[in-house]
Amino acid sequence: MDKKLLFVYNPKAGKAQIKNKLADILDVFAKEGYEITVAPTQKKDDARSIVAHRREEYELVVCSGGDGTLDEVVTGMIESGLRTPIGYIPAGSTNDFGGSISLPKNMVRAAQIAVKGRDYQCDIGTFQEDDARDVFVYIAAFGLFTDVSYETEQEMKNVLGHMAYLLEGMKSLSSIRSYPMKVSWDGNELEGDFIFGMITNSFSVGGFRNITGKNVKLDDGVFEVTLIKNPRNPIELSNIMISLLNRDIDTSAMYCFRTSELTLESRGPVAWTLDGENGGSHTKVTIRNVQKGIDIRVKPLPE
């Protein structure tokens, strides 16, 4: 064996289902001739650190967990300065990105794609305030529901799946906050009060497909941006949610556009989420698309 593979996995992701599949997954890797280094994460940020400080000799990095684990691996990849193909075995509660690149929910089949698939050059995003920079794979968001994923206990996510997010989100409906912001992109500028905003490179968010727009491409160098205005009453809020889920854009209630870069400025700190994980609170951020910034393993092209 002269090929080396680094396998990073979150043993608690989703319903901890990898415990029953781990031997089969490692067998898939071994049958392809890989010498395997196995690294189970123990705490937040482990995946990033492991990948950032990996040896250069690895031909492939495979991770298993939720989108947050993938986010850490991609961040570590960028920090390392080394560009190694990434295989992804989804094992989280929603797996928006895995669905966007058509990875199967069957973990063994996803492992086979990781070692036998083709490399797809996918866009990623950078999220920057002053000199501090972070990386995200498919979504940066603020406002309504964005605190749900990192405030929901892992055990609750495991048991309830999507319902956990919805139940936690419903608790915040009675105290919706709006955020006065100035948004600048491509020579355009707007100001308004927004209850929610998302900058995405994905076909689905929170398990809902097509919520990010039509004709989405993951390698075109632009994000899909959605900013929802502050509703004047509960009926307007209900109509906004219906419009968003149906992707029936109501221009009186929201702004939707595509761009490769935008800056958002607020009067006070705004809490952000990056790929479903806590992205900190910021008053001014610049978000840039890094076109084809990573190589991710996807299904081979049909012969």
Image (tube, helix red, strand yellow):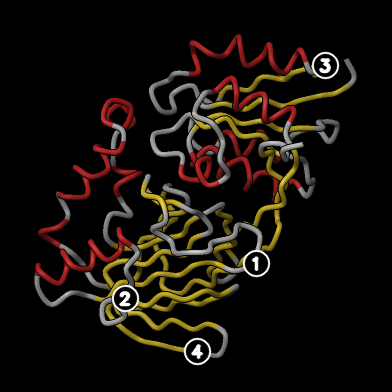
Name the residue: 54% across, 38% down: 45
Spatial CA span between label 3 and label 4: 53 Å
- Residue 33's tag is 3
Where is the C terminus found, in terms of image quarters?
Answer: top right
Q: Which tag, 1 or 4, sits closer to the chain's start?
A: 4
Q: Of label 3 and label 4, which has the lower sequence position?
A: 3
In this orientation, does residue 18 appear? yes
Quadrant position of the N terminus in the picture? top right
Q: Is residue 257 above or below residue 106?
A: below
In the rendered image, which residue does mark 2 sit on? 254
Left or right of residue 118, residue 174 in this image: left
Residue 151, located in which quarter of the rendered image? top left
Q: 259 or 150, which lies in front?
A: 259
Q: Residues within 10 Å of mark 2 (few under 14, many from 20)?
A: some
Find the distance from the CA under tag 3 to the CA under tag 1: 35 Å
Residue drawn at x 41%, y 75% is 256
Q: Are marks 4 and 2 in contact (CB under 8 Å)?
A: no
**Circle 2: residue type:** Met
Instruction: Select label 4 or label 2 by which is in front.
Output: 2
**In x, y percent, where is residue 289?**
62, 66
Crowding near the residue tagged with mark 4, few <14, some 14–19, many ≥20 C-alpha atoms within 10 Å:
few
Q: Is residue 69 left or right of residue 93?
A: right
Task: Say which quarter of the image contains residue 51.
Answer: top right
Choose between 148 and 250: the one closer to the eye.
Answer: 250
Q: Which residue in the protein does label 1 denote?
A: 221
Percent across and percent down for residue 8 are 62, 27
The disc at residue 188 is: 4
Q: Percent x, y for residue 201?
A: 53, 58
> Label 1 to label 4, Cα distance in Å?
18 Å
Q: Disc 1 marks which amino acid?
A: Gly
Element marked by disc 2: strand
What type is the residue that disc 3 sits on?
A: Gly
